[in-house]
């Protein structure tokens, strides 16, 4: 995958502003399960990592209802701009607006860095959310990347998102 740093934000008039820099190679890294999280059974790890895969699948299908179904009942997000939204209806509205603004060719790729257990049914993940587009050379072109602190809760063997805190990725 090629990487272009994209300085983008939604201004008051809702226009998307872009600033591109030269490509830098992107190398995927496997997630690290730290501390007690290293003791998770393989099926528990797969269920946790599967949540990130389902998030990407729903995002790439532009399906806000399916995306919000991955959140806990009172789950929410704090965006890098400082805005917050909590609960299913607010998240559906937010993602519906976002998906209307973005071209269909853009995809979301989640990369999980580290996973730490905060309790028997609670975990915190350091993640990176990448927005990629098809490159004219083949492969993907990284347009933008956000850092995320994701708190997830386990009910049975299923994980649900409690909160996502997004921040601009520093280089």
Image (cartoon, grey):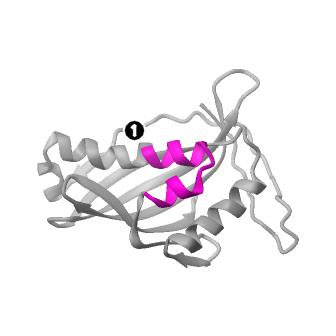
Decide which of 51, 133 is in the foreground and name it: 51
Counting from the top left corner in percent of width and height, residue 34 is at 21, 54
Q: Which residue occupies 35% across, 43% down? A: 50
Q: Position of residue 117 (x, y in %)?
A: 21, 62
Within 10 angstroms of label 1, few (less than 14), some, or many (20 or more) residues? few
Which image quarter holds the N terminus?
Answer: top right
In depth, the one of 36 and 94 nearer the eye is 94
Residue 97 within the segment the image draws in magenta: no
Residue 100: image quadrant is bottom right
Q: Position of residue 51 (x, y in %)?
A: 37, 49
Q: Is residue 42 visible?
A: yes
At a point 75% along the width and 59% down the height, the residue shown is 8
Q: Could you tell me residue 136's position as x and y percent?
A: 76, 24
Q: Give left or right: position of 117 versus 65.
A: left
Residue 78 visible within the image: no
Residue 56 sits inside the magenta stretch: yes
Quadrant housing residue 93: bottom right
Residue 109 in the image: above or below residue 151: above
Q: Main secondary structure of the magenta part?
A: helix
- Residue at left 72%, top 51%? 6
Q: Nearer the viewer, residue 145 or 75?
A: 75
Residue position marked by numbered label 1 in the rendering = 29
Q: Quadrant of the C terminus?
A: bottom right
Tell me: 37 left or right of 24.
left
Which element is circle 1 on? loop
- From the viewer's perspective, is residue 62 above or below residue 86? above
Residue found farthest to the top: 137
Q: How many marks?
A: 1
Residue located at (20% from left, 47% from top): 44
Which range is magenta? 54-69
């Amino acid at each position: 995958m090629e990487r272009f740093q994209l300085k983008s934000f939604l201004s008051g008039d809702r226009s998307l502003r872009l600033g591109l820099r030269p490509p830098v190679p992107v190398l995927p890294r496997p997630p690290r399960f730290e501390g007690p999280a290293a003791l998770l059974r393989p099926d528990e790890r797969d269920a946790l990592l599967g949540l990130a895969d389902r998030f990407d699948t729903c995002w790439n299908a532009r399906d806000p209802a399916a995306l919000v179904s991955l959140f806990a009942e009172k789950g929410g997000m704090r965006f890098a701009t400082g805005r917050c939204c909590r609960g299913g209806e607010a998240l559906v509205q937010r993602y519906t607006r976002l998906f209307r603004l973005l071209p269909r060719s853009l995809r979301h790729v989640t990369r999980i860095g580290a996973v730490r257990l905060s309790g028997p049914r609670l975990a915190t993940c350091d993640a990176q959310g990448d927005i990629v587009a098809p490159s004219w050379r083949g492969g993907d072109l990284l347009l933008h990347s956000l850092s995320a602190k994701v708190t997830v809760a386990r009910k049975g063997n299923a994980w649900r998102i409690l909160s996502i805190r997004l921040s601009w990725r520093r280089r």
